[in-house]
Amino acid sequence: MPAHSKRNTSLAFFTAYERSLLKTAWGSQSTTLTRDAFLPFGSCALCLLQAVDPVACPQGDIFCRACALSNLVAQRTEIKRLEKEWERRREEAESVEAGEEEEIRQRAVLEFERVQAGLGSGVKKSGGSGEEAQSKTPAAAAGTKRKFELDETELLRIAQEERTKLRREIDDEKRALAKHTSFWAPSQTPDGSLSRTSIPQKPPKLTPLCPASSESAPHNLTLKTLTTIRFTEEKSKPTCPACRKALTNISKGVLGIPCGHVLCKSCVDKFMQPVRTPDPHNPGMEHGVLRCYVCEENLMDEDDNDEKQTEERNGKKDKKKKKSKEVDKVKRGLVELKSDGTGFAGGGRNTVEKKGVAFQC
């Protein structure tokens, strides 16, 4: 091929044309979504269609009920598979540890038999000859006999040193053998070696995650925390029950938990703000209570004042009991439903990124 060819394979570096080809398949890529890629308001985050029997997670992600249930079942199945995989790897690690312990014991027995046969232990002495060691001791210089004392701690220390030395020899042999074996073997991979230290003592505590959550801020998803969405429909379109305008990605629908009614954000700011201070001219008006515009259900938990009073009276015990009771409990309040769009409508989520390994040369 000529030297000026676009696909010259005789060069030791990539040409500009070859680098442009690699950029399309390697490395991280990002792009800005256009209007055609945005889903309409009320679409399911899993099937990407208009949600049927819609439900919402505590963070405002919308799903079809069937899609959410199937995703939860799939995640539960995967969690059980991972737990069984952990148990299998734990059993394999214990068997490998038992085999190594048996090999260390056999080597210790063989070394003892060699010493008894007069063949030497093969251990290098760094403290000089035995005669020099005896001449340095004060008992040998005085010519008196030393009394033999059996110290249990000293014996345990010597046994531990022997086990450490034998284990180091076995590791060195395996490391030397690995240089001559196939590098693609599973045992030669970084996580291929099974040991108790490489596998956690307890199985990983996994919980189903919301499929629409981001990698930087994932949140849990359970069947109890799903809230049924009750849209007010007019002409088969979800509308705001206050202003009678259609709910779109721009109107920013707000969900009331646990009733499930949805209003636009502007109407929520106008009609669903709790009265913070009591009105002396209207003593019958509630203050500090947030109620739904449609069904007038209380969207707030117990009053903060009542909680503080009970905590001061009963101490921390009631607080601990309350935390244990609120596990997997839907927290009342207002949640903004997620929607696509640019700028204010999408909350800056109109850029997608594909991560990959960069090919460098």
Image: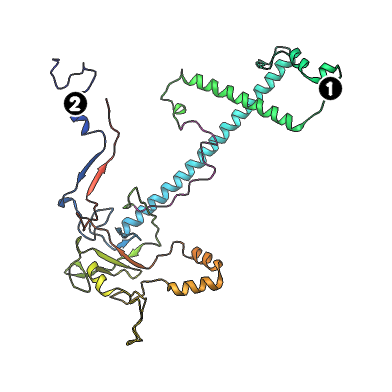
Q: Nearer the viewer, residue 131 or 332?
A: 131
> Which labelled disc corresponds to residue 18?
2
Left or right: where does residue 357 sit relative to residue 326? left
- The residue under label 1 is 146
Which quarter of the figure is the C terminus placed in?
A: top left
The answer to whether 267 is drawn above or below residue 207 in the figure is below
Query: From where the camera sits, is residue 103 visible?
Result: no
* Residue shown at 73% from the left, 12% from the top: 118
The answer to whether 33 is drawn above or below residue 101 in the figure is below
Query: Where is residue 277 drawn, in percent x and y?
Result: 35, 78
- Asked where in the image residue 354 lies, by quadrant, the reply is top left
- Asked where in the image residue 257 lies, by quadrant, the reply is bottom left
Judged by its main secondary structure, the magenta piece is loop
Query: Alpha-carbon neighbours of circle 2 within 10 Å: few (<14), some, or many (≥20)?
Result: few
Left or right: where does residue 129 sit relative to residue 326? right
Instruction: Look at label 2 and name its amino acid.
Output: Glu
* Residue shown at 34% from the left, 74% from the top: 290
The mark closer to the camera, 2 or 1, is: 1
Q: What sort of colour scheme is used for the picture?
A: rainbow
The residue tagged with tag 2: helix, strand or loop? helix
The answer to whether 263 is drawn above or below residue 91 in the figure is below
Instruction: Look at label 1 and name its amino acid.
Output: Arg
Start-end of magenta stretch: 191-210
Query: Where is residue 103 drawn, in percent x and y?
Result: 62, 25
